[in-house]
Image (cartoon, rainbow, N blue to C red):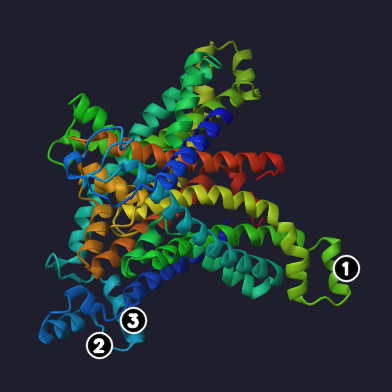
Amino acid sequence: MNKLFFIISMFWIFLFLARFTLDWNPNEMVFDYILSGPTNEAWLGMDDYGRSIATRLVDGLVNSSLIVLLATLVSSSIGILIGMTSGYLGGRFDQFILFIINLFMSFPGILLAIAFAAVLSPGKLNLILALSIGGWVGYARLARSQTLSIKNIDFVKASQTMGGNNQWILFKHIFPNLRTPLIVEGTYALASLVIAEASLSFLGLGLQAPDASWGGMMRDSVRYLLVAPHYAIFVGLSIMSVVFWINAIGDYVHNRWNING
Amino acid sequence: MKHSLVNHFSLLFFQVLGIFILCFFLIHLVPGDPVLVMLGETASLADQDHLRAQLGLDKPLFDQLLITFKNILNGNLGYSFFYQQPVSHLIKGALINTYHLALVAIFITMVIGLSAGFYAAKNQNSWVDRCVSHTSVLFISIPHFFLGPLLILFFSIFLGWLPVSGMESPVSIILPALTLAMGLIAITVKMTRNCMIELLESDVARTARAKGLSEQQVLLRHVFRLVLMPIITILAMQFGSLLSGAVITETIFSWNGLGKLLVDSIQSRDYPVTQACVLVIATSYVLINFLTEFIYRWADPRVRTDGHE
């Protein structure tokens, strides 16, 4: 497990350094080498426009990370805020939020993201929005249930008695206690978000050409499966390696902080 | 029991209503004029007006909502201007194909998942067991859009056994179904193995052994039956991932199901079809979840007493 983690980290660091120190151009086309296998110049071969797959994989990683991290930021802030407030205030408001959460959860997997990405015009911002629309629910649910279990503990009561207003209690007392489970949830959610982003791009709803994206590369590679199987395999392995890498961090954090459930 | 059932029914009703309203507003999210987006900037004014009237976009928002709702209750999901067909007609054909695919995928999952998990539990800690648990970790984490091409590479291009894509011959269903099933198989194997190992040391197995049954009879008659229940629950819970996985899988294998219809309609900007696909997929997901809960309550009396009594 640790060995594989180390190898994947080394592989990407090496490719990153090579990409940026040797200043490879992700959009440079060499028409003589279209769909060629690994060579000295292009270590992982060339794609259907004669561009280096290795270079585009690194750029895809940068683009993908940016989108996934921003989507996580947006969805977690919205989700945590809604979940925490709903759990703390309780009553009708909580019932309403619970219904909304259930409603969003009745769309399986990335269906909601697909639907939103489909009607919004393609672009980075809309992609982040589409991913966040499905993503906030997980955070909201966790934040709500954690808040419900915390809000009756004495230190919260004490703060209420001393006249702390809701805002103060939420951010000074409840939020710090939510952080740990939320970070663990966030790490795992990051891994599935990488796949969701790649899926959207695979369907042509994510980043548009000529920006490099893993899903887009995967889609192109499937077309040339017969003549250039290395293309699909390298892209697929890259996505899986990063997902594995994030999950390994998630497991580490999970075990380190000893969280159950 | 009755009280909680009513609760579940009303929740189901409001959930479906909510899904409907969300889907309804989807078309209003299109930036700019949806009619122009669908027809292109060069469309004639008459065409634009025609489509606008067809989609009901010339009426007030609330009226549109009511009209759409009434139409859906009558089984009228709108008209696809790209295919020049009623949407309900398109959906019906696609739904049948998707359900074939899902059924075959679940069948494969049950057969391979249960037998592999069964075998692994019986030969605990053997090399087969370790091998099974390692590959299942791999298959849980492999995304559909990578697994599909890998299976094509191996079975169609390298071995030449199965068609690459399309749905001409009956064997074409194997690869897409396998793509959908792999993740489920991995989960089923893991669940079956762990459940079996736990049950083999439980009172049920001990009593059966004490009656003088052979080990095989203990396994097949007593333990195996108890394993089925959680497996069915897990499979039903995973039905959603099956549906959303179908979007990618059907696109890869050109399988004319609901997922492919959804993607095609997005590409041709045929929003009434997009809307209907999302509505149908989400509703069937909610319905299946409801049925699972229902069956589970009926089968396992412990669940019933948890809530209100």
Q: Which amino acid does the dot numbered 1 rest on? A: Ala
Q: What x and y, as percent, mark residue A228?
A: 22, 35
Q: Is residue B38 left or right of residue A242?
A: left
How many tags in the picture?
Answer: 3
Query: Crowding near pointer 3: few (<14 within 10 Å), some, many (20+)?
Result: few
In this view, the residue farthest toward the front is A22
- Label 1 to label 3: alpha-carbon separation: 51 Å
Query: Crowding near pointer 2: few (<14 within 10 Å), some, many (20+)?
Result: few
Q: Which residue is mark 1?
A: A158
In this view, the mark in front (1 or 3): 1
Q: Which amino acid does the dot numbered 3 rest on? A: Leu
Please say whether residue A109 is visible from this viewpoint: no
Please say whether residue B48 is visible from this viewpoint: yes
Do the CB atoms of the residues marked 1 and 2 lie less than 8 Å apart? no
Q: What x and y, as percent, mark residue A59?
A: 39, 50
Do the CB atoms of the residues marked 3 and 2 lie less than 8 Å apart? no
- The residue depicted at 30 percent of the width and 45 percent of the height is A218
Q: Is residue B2 left or right of residue B264?
A: right
Instruction: Identify the element where label 2 is drawn.
Output: loop
Of A168 and A141, nearer the camera is A168
- Compared with B88, B157 (above or below) is above
In this view, the mark in front (3 or 2): 2
Q: Quadrant of residue A37?
A: top left
Of A56 and B173, nearer the camera is A56
Of A137 and A219, nearer the camera is A219
Instruction: Identify the element where label 1 is drawn.
Output: helix
Q: Which residue is mark 2?
A: B58
Q: Is residue A130 left or right of residue B207?
A: left
- Compared with B79, B42 (above or below) is below
The disc label shown at residue B66, or none: 3
